[in-house]
Image (cartoon, rainbow, N blue to C red):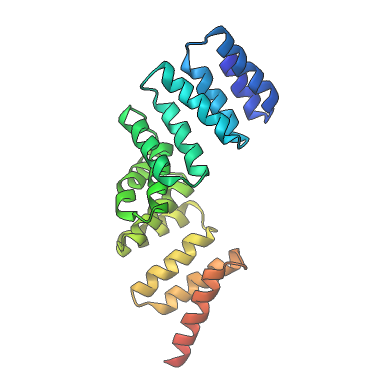
Amino acid sequence: MDYIQQGLEYMKEHNVEEAAKQFNLHIEHHPNDPIGYINFGNLLAHIKEYDRAKRFFEKALDLKEEVPTAHYGLGNVYFDEENYAEATQQYQKAIQQGLDEADVYLMLGMSLMNQEQPKLALPYLQRASELNQDDVDVQFQYGLSLAYANLIDEAFKQFNRVLELDKNHSDAHYNLGVSYLYKDQPKEALKHFKQALNIQPDHLLAGHGKKQVEELLNSQ
């Protein structure tokens, strides 16, 4: 087993120190190979040593101009630092350089959502949902982008899709409730707000929605 594979095995075991040793050995033996720096950068990002992680990713890019996984790693660091504009740029570069995986589309979409640009986020989250159809979080984030873009019918279908994957997804129930309100079906909305609260009793938005709908129904 080579140093990178051994390091990745240690990371799976949450053995950060041994993983670092293996990645460092790879760098010592292959100083011009960006892969060692990328994996060390991922490790540093994992333990939230963001400044050091950036230096490793940048070193990888100094060695080779087009390394999409280095841009993806840098994007994750900037995302964690809530620098969504810079994260967006890095994810876009990763995609332009050939990275075609659900994770990079998801993160690019979420970066744009955090910049209140749901319509720009939409195609990336749709692509993520196509590439990973059974991932609950991916499907939910796509549903949110549809809702924020005021595509209510499409969002309604998507939140139902989330509940097919996970019937106890409290946020999907809440958002489905909101969708029913847009459809002027308060009784159905109330069912989903209650369901969200059954799953997560401290769901503040669902609690607020339930109260409003109950007041509305009682006044009729």
Q: Position of residue 106 (x, y in %)?
A: 41, 43
Is residue 65 visible in the rendered image? The answer is yes
Q: Position of residue 115 (x, y in %)?
A: 39, 53
Q: Looking at this view, is 71 or 203 the one in front?
A: 71
Residue shown at 48% from the left, 26% from the top: 57
Residue shown at 47% from the left, 13% from the top: 33
Q: Is residue 119 left or right of residue 82?
A: left
Q: Is residue 69 left or right of residue 92?
A: right
Q: Which quadrant does the C terminus fall into?
A: bottom left
Q: Is residue 35 left or right of residue 105?
A: right
Q: Position of residue 130 (x, y in %)?
A: 35, 42
Q: Is residue 150 left or right of residue 10?
A: left
Residue 28 in the image: above or below residue 99: above
Q: Looking at this view, is 120 or 151 the one in front?
A: 120
Q: Which quadrant does the N terminus fall into?
A: top right
- For this orientation, the residue located farthest to the top is 29
Q: Position of residue 137 (x, y in %)?
A: 48, 49
Residue 69 in the image: above or below residue 183: above
Residue shown at 62% from the left, 23% from the top: 9
Name the image quarter holding residue 40: top right
Name the image quarter holding residue 161: bottom left
- For this orientation, the residue located farthest to the bottom is 219
